[in-house]
Image: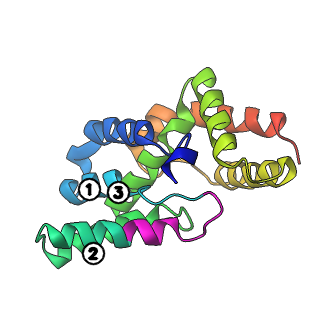
Amino acid sequence: SGLSRKYHTLEHIYHCLEEFNGIKDFAENSDALEMAVWFHDIVYKPNAQDNEEKSAQLASRYLELMALPEKFRKQVERLILATKHNYIPEDMDLKLILDIDLSSLGSPIEEFKKRTEKIRQEYRGFSEVEFRQGIHDFAHSLLSRESIYLTPQFKARYEEKARRNLETLLVKIPT
């Protein structure tokens, strides 16, 4: 339910929309990208493996009710599904939504810590060991990449800070 959300809230969406506003001129289809930002976490359950699929389906239904073309709906779905962060895309708009979604990793350290605490609250149904392992795996997977961010705009703005934040997190949350 929405009441259990602490991080994946409208505040996260507003943050993502602010990031979108700064890069929308680089998007191939800025309307689809903006729509995907709005909908990408509309369904969010910490223990679910299909949040992105359900969010994409819900977005598609709403866009269909708004009589938007199927091609547009499919592009929004594709963008939302990319936020599973389970592959590195070639498409610029897919790269942009992934970078937007991860932009908060490059926040000032105090803000980063508060967001991490909010994520822990969302995952309160998980044991400390399970949560630490999940955070460790996520941070390690990002740090093992050549670059956390996939676009020059986000690399320049956030890469260095995000790496420091994630490295600090790994020291704080050893496995």
Does 62 sit above or below residue 27?
A: below
As for residue 50 lying within the magenta part, the answer is yes
Contact, CB < 8 Å: mark 1 with mark 3? yes
Q: Amino acid at mark 2?
A: Lys
Residue 156, image x, y percentages: 45, 35
Does 59 sit above or below residue 148?
A: below
Res. 115 in view: yes
Residue 136 lies left or right of residue 109; in this view the side is right
Q: Which residues are magenta?
A: 46-56
Which residue in the protein does label 1 denote?
Answer: 35
Q: CA distance from mark 3 to mark 2?
A: 13 Å
Looking at the rendered structure, the secondary structure element under dot 2 is helix
Residue 129 lies left or right of residue 165; in this view the side is right
Looking at the rendered structure, the secondary structure element under dot 1 is helix
Image mark for residue 39: 3
Q: CA distance from mark 2 to mark 1?
A: 12 Å
Looking at the rendered structure, the secondary structure element under dot 3 is helix
As for residue 55 lying within the magenta part, the answer is yes
Which residue in the protein does label 2 denote?
Answer: 74
Residue 39 lies left or right of residue 124; in this view the side is left
